[in-house]
Amino acid sequence: MTAQTGKKNIIAGNWKMNLGLKASEALALTLRGLSDNLKKSEIWIAPSAIALAATTQALKGSAIRVGSQNVCAQKAGAFTGEVSVAMLQEIAVSFALVGHSERRSLYAESIDQCVARAFGAIEQGLDVVFCVGESLSERESGSTFEVVSAQLKPLLEALKNNGSVRSLVIAYEPVWAIGTGKVATTEQIAETHRDIHQLLSQYTTPETVVPILYGGSVTADNFASIIALEHVSGALVGGASLLYEKFAPLLEISEL
Ligand code: PGA
């Protein structure tokens, strides 16, 4: 499986610890109707672990991709609370989020751990949406790209020898913009995406597409100006992905 999807925008919903089994199945089924008509966009969703199997079942045969919100680097063994790539693949999960800021800050996942998870997942055949982003104090002290690069570079180094960077999607999510209603300005997004693109170009050939998504308080009110930016290939959406009425307009904007 490869994350390279030509030039389609990826509109990814991170449902976090919301929506149980029934609610996830129901939302997946409504999105299924929507996905048939998409020409320029793909829907990726990351339901809670408990809802993954039911969601992939509900979406069988559709173009919507289902992902896990995290994944273990190791293949099997004494790793209480973790889920392996093989377990996810058995239920048709095709990607995983790794390094979300809530994992990094609330659960103390280090840069090394996030890189190991992403590398292990890609090596075993999953695509990975790897989240990077700076805190407010890091932004204010002018170290945004230093922080993002410290999160991302070790993964690019690890992947560079086997061509598997093709399985990578990057989500740039300023920590201060996640769930706060404070979206980054288009200048801030454009600048960081350009910097990430430049870093990526040191590790990829010009033909290799590594989509860079923006995340952080994306809604239908701000998405048109974000998706219009160069090097923005879609969005990772939290709050606005939980309701069809809020998510569907993002797809409409992406299709314009
Ligand atoms: P938000 O979350 O859209 O609610 O800000 C984004 C994310 O955490 O990926």
Image: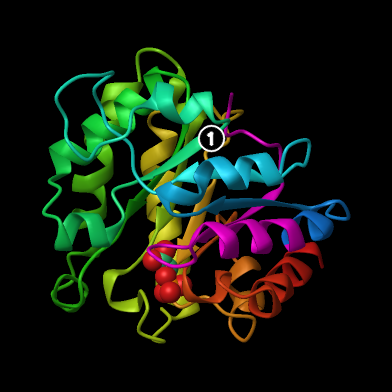
Decide if residue 49 is on the left or right side of residue 34. left
Q: Going 16% across and 63% down the picture, which residue do you hit?
A: 106
Q: Measured from the top left, where is residue 173 in percent x and y? A: 37, 64
Residue 201 versus residue 80: which sits nearer the camera? 80
Label 1: which secondary element: loop
Q: Residue most toward the front? A: 22
Decide if residue 86 is on the left or right side of residue 80. right
Using the image, determine if residue 205 lies above or below residue 139: above
The quadrant the C terminus occupies is bottom right
Q: Measured from the top left, where is residue 128 in percent x and y? A: 44, 37
Q: Going 78% across and 35% down the picture, which residue do you hit?
A: 61
Residue type, mark 1 in image: Val
Range covered by the magenta-colored residues: 1-30
Can you see residue 204?
no
Q: Measured from the top left, where is residue 176 in percent x and y? A: 28, 77
For label 1, the residue is: 93
Can you see residue 256?
yes
Residue 62, magenta (yes or no): no
